[in-house]
């Protein structure tokens, strides 16, 4: 899903790829090999739709840009639509700062907990307590398997068993041993996704209902049901059955794609943004259609339902610099001593939780 861009020739790119390339983080070649701090290549953001400023000018004088409307609905905050894109809804600042902090914490502490799967499963098997281990600066140690041992606590077969150890413990007990270890903070930085509720099998690009799973937490279900409201038909209620949590670090991107594994595309995907500001691209039904670019800030919610679900979309850029990240309120909220690890993480990261009705 996350890929780096190594092709340089523009001629064989689709319109979507060209726009991805326009916004993707590249470093200024003059600073790359020099001793100066690497500088991001400047990018023209003048064409990026900014729903925060649209909300402000709408509140001040009722003005909306051409092509943008406000949805008439019984919702307690403005919901915007794009005239040319039925089924797409943008709810700026939908989550309070307290809600943002809560879901950032859950995304880091409880959502990656087994039986939920993460990108680390394929290599390491299930890893419990990753965030706490990172806070405690622990190491994940691979233990040699005893022949014939049944490793039944691991979700995957054919994976090494492992345990957490402090670095001191490792030094004293394993001297001369060839066992491998990796620090929890590196694993946390390399966390790319976790899945809640029905588990998604990325290798088959389908839901695998036979994989062990927990229900999506009630509080997240309630929130998703409420937020899905503007995209639901009268009398219908959204049923959250699965969620994918995406974790982005500086330079990460989510390439253009469709979410097409759910049975009923009339139901929305409820997608919430947390942490550093990002650019979202909303394309057309073909990758050759030029996408619209828009900012996604912490607390924004996007709904994609009906026709909008047939549109390619992706995230080519997150901003981690002080000027553009726009995470001041989160930094303030995480300024307590107990929250230092969340603060360190979110300063250079973005989290997206997207919640789906599968059937
Ligand atoms: O990160 C986002 O805002 C979009 C996520 C997304 O498109 C997806 O997971 O399918």
Image (cartoon, rainbow, N blue to C red):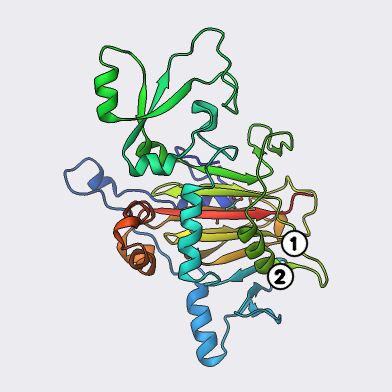
Considering every residue shown, the one lying at the far right of the view is 235
The quarter holding residue 309 reads: bottom right
Q: For the residues labelled 2 and 1, say whether their Cβ atoms are less than 8 Å apart.
A: yes
Q: Position of residue 206 (x, y in %)?
A: 71, 38
On screen, residue 248 versus residue 137, left or right, reads: right
The quarter holding residue 230 reads: bottom right
Q: Position of residue 317 (x, y in %)?
A: 45, 54
Q: Residues within 10 Å of mark 2 (few under 14, many from 20)?
A: some
Label placed on residue 229? 2
SS at badge 1: loop
Q: Residue at x 82, y 73 (%)?
A: 234
Q: Position of residue 355 (x, y in %)?
A: 65, 55
Q: Residue at x 51, y 41 (%)?
A: 2
Label placed on residue 238? 1
The answer to which of 132 and 89 lies nearer the viewer is 132
The answer to which of 219 and 271 lies nearer the viewer is 219
Q: Residue at x 41, y 36 (%)?
A: 187
Image quadrant for the N terminus? Answer: top right
Q: Position of residue 170 (x, y in %)?
A: 29, 24
């Amino acid at each position: 899903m996350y890929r780096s861009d190594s092709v340089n020739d523009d001629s064989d790119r689709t319109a979507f790829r060209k726009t991805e390339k326009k916004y993707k983080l590249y470093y200024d070649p003059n600073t790359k090999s020099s001793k100066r701090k690497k500088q991001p290549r400047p990018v023209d953001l003048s064409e990026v739709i900014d729903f925060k400023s649209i909300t402000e000018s709408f509140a001040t004088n009722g003005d909306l840009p051409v092509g943008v409307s406000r949805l008439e609905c019984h919702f307690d905050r403005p919901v915007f639509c794009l005239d040319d894109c039925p089924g797409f809804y943008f709810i700026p600042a939908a989550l309070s700062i307290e809600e943002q902090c809560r879901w950032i914490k859950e995304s880091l502490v409880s959502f990656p907990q087994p039986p939920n799967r993460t990108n680390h499963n394929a290599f390491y098997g299930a890893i419990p307590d990753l965030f706490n281990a990172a806070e405690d600066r622990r190491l994940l140690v691979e233990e040699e398997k005893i022949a014939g041992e049944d490793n039944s606590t691991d979700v995957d077969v054919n994976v090494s068993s492992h345990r957490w150890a402090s670095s001191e413990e490792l030094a004293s007990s394993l001297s001369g041993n060839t066992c491998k270890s990796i620090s929890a903070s590196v694993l946390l930085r390399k966390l790319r996704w976790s899945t809640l509720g029905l588990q998604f099998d990325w290798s088959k690009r389908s839901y695998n209902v036979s994989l062990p799973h927990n229900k999506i937490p009630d509080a997240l279900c309630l929130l998703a049901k409420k937020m899905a409201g503007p995209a639901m038909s009268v009398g219908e209620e959204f049923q959250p059955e699965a969620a994918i949590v995406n974790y982005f670090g500086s330079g990460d991107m989510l390439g253009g794609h469709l979410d097409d594994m759910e049975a009923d595309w009339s139901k929305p995907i409820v997608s919430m943004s947390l942490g550093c500001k990002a650019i979202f691209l909303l394309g057309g039904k073909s990758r050759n259609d030029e996408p619209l670019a828009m900012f996604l800030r912490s607390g924004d919610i996007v709904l994609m339902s009906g026709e909008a679900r047939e549109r390619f979309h992706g995230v080519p850029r997150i901003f981690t610099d002080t000027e553009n990240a726009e995470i001041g309120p989160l930094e303030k909220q995480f300024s307590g001593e107990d929250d230092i690890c969340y603060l360190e993480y979110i300063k250079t990261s973005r989290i997206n939780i997207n919640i789906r009705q599968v059937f």
